[in-house]
Image: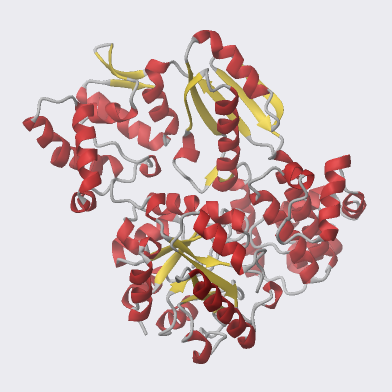
Amino acid sequence: MSKNLELAKIFYRWADILDLKGDNPFHIRAYRQAAKVLEDLKEDIEDVIKNNKKLPGIGASLRKKIIEYLETGKIKDFEKLKEEFPPSLFELFEIPGLGPKTIKLLYERLNIKSIDDLEQAIKEGKLLRLPSFGLKKVEKIKKGLEIYKISRDKIPLGFALQIANFIIGSLKRNLKDVITNISYAGSTRRMKETVGDIDILVTVKNKKFVDKVNEEFKNLEIVKEVLWEGPTRTSILTKDGVQVDLRIIEKKSWGAALQYFTGSKAHNIALRKICLEKGYKLNEYGLYKDDKVVASENEEEIYLTLGLYPPPPELRENLGELTEAKKIFEKYIQPILNKEKLSLLDAYKLLKESIKSDENLRKKISFENLVTLKDIKGDLHVHSKYSDGANTLEEILKAALDFGYEYIGIADHSKSLKVANGLSEEEVKKRNYEIDKINEKIGKKVLLKVMEVDILPDGSLDYDEDILKDLDIVIAAIHSRFNQDNTERLLRAIENKYVNIIAHPSGRIINQRPSYDVDWDKVFKAASENNVALEINAYFNRLDLNDTLAYKAYKEYNCKFAINTDSHFIDQFWMVILGVGQARRAWLPKESIITTYNLPELLKWAQLKR
């Protein structure tokens, strides 16, 4: 998979250079789309090329460049092109809110070609000498720099999961008779939107296999450098610059290690405080009472022994989960123990079995009522070839059915977003006709007629009622004028009787662009009162709404949500797991997510507003 990511990085950089040169926007978009396809491709690009398979969204010219890289390790045109600018200049693209036009201006007028240059120029007040650069704009750049410094050593969760799953899959496949347990831990297991180092824990059948596991890990194709090597911990740096720590744990300490290394730090500190109050000691080797291990092999048993219902990993941030864990234990586990002569673990298992067959019981236990991946019935935000997607309607249909979805929303861009090939009214009608014909052919409604309609600066939509009334679902989104206060703009869109969902509501892009200014209390109140769902956009660098805002929207305003992937390529469907993780971190129950509805429920919900 490393070649996929290497090529994706090259095409992203190629697009950045073309941006600086002021190239054709459609040409730039082709490179960015190719990069997206490559970073989300399930198969190894070398196998795809070897077997002469199609690469959706990548034409013959870019395919030749891919082949050239695979054969020679470089692309001549790219090597020549990147010589036009200093390599350090491209780090400026990582600063949120700093676009190619501004970067070009800074470079040409002030010779700013690195982060250090930019910081020095701000200190000396040089930016204020540039046309259209006022105090407000300079402050925005300073804020972007601060965000960049905080986040530069972290990678998006989507990348971390791909790396962790590749390593775990490789080790399990190659050492299936050696490994007994394996899992990622840390912030990856807690599904945080960005991740620093990746922690992977392993147990083996016998100590004699420890060296074998370490050797296999060190020799994986993604390894660039071995940073540290020891009998119980080996650290490597991947070719993408990510540190991964592999820890070999004794089987008897598996549960304690998994709990400890999952964290968070704040959660573990609070948990140790509970231990001290109850006369226990807890570390990565086990839970101790009077120096005797009372729980270690099973993670759930550690929490249960402390009188706590095991909180899901996504909630372990010391934000109320331990208080809730105590309440659930006392209300549901303790009565079982009082009634039956069972161990803590058996009482927990008995309750879990009861939850499976009792929907009402599940709803009463907040930790069990969080949305799960298996609850998701469909995705309402997928782009097709009609706008800027890489796949045909038939290809999307097949992928959706293979994914186990009941429905899929074809949500192409509207006419205002010309750079994304937004559809004219006639093109919408043509696409809707094709959707109807495909559904008729398969004998059921799977493809839904959806559009991602632009919210114009005054809050109106860029299609009139004649188009909107024929759609199954209307998604409204802001794609321009990010720098203004967008509260009134969003409120007007929410009040439109055809709008069902607000896409990527805050507009932020992780590590690149901050949220625009919005009065969230007004927006959440309006969304709740107007029966409009807020999207949890699962695309790896959006995850928007974030967990904090989603928690507020649900707890204070009882808002509804839609977990969608915003896929432009069918191999991006997997990102739904990122959206589910974000929703779980926000304590969202299944009932608050409209994409857990079956199709009749969903369509009935959508029509309520009209």
> What residue is shown at x 22% (from left), y 21% (from top)?
279
Location of residue 99 in the rendering, given as x and y in whole percent from the top left corner: 71, 64
> What residue is shown at x 68% (from left), y 37% (from top)?
241
Residue ranking furthest to the top: 208
Quadrant of the snapshot with the C terminus: bottom left
Q: Is residue 116 visible?
A: no
Q: How many marks on residues?
A: 0
Residue 28 appears in which quarter of the rendering?
Answer: bottom right
> What residue is shown at x 37% (from left), y 54% (from top)?
375
> What residue is shown at x 91% (from left), y 53% (from top)?
77
Viewed as shown, does residue 32 lie left or right of 534?
right
Q: Nearer the viewer, residue 478 or 417?
A: 417
Viewed as shown, does residue 353 lie left or right of 140?
left
Location of residue 38 in the rendering, given as x and y in whole percent from the top left corner: 70, 51
Q: Is residue 404 visible?
A: yes
**Looking at the image, residue 568 lies above or below residue 43:** below
**Image colouring:** secondary structure
Location of residue 278 in the rendering, given as x and y in whole percent from the top left corner: 20, 25
Location of residue 507 in the rendering, given as x and y in whole percent from the top left corner: 55, 66
Q: Which of 299 and 471 is in front in this view?
A: 471
**Looking at the image, residue 551 lies above or below residue 352:** below
**Looking at the image, residue 12 lies above or below residue 350:** below
Q: Which of 598 and 551 is in front in this view?
A: 598
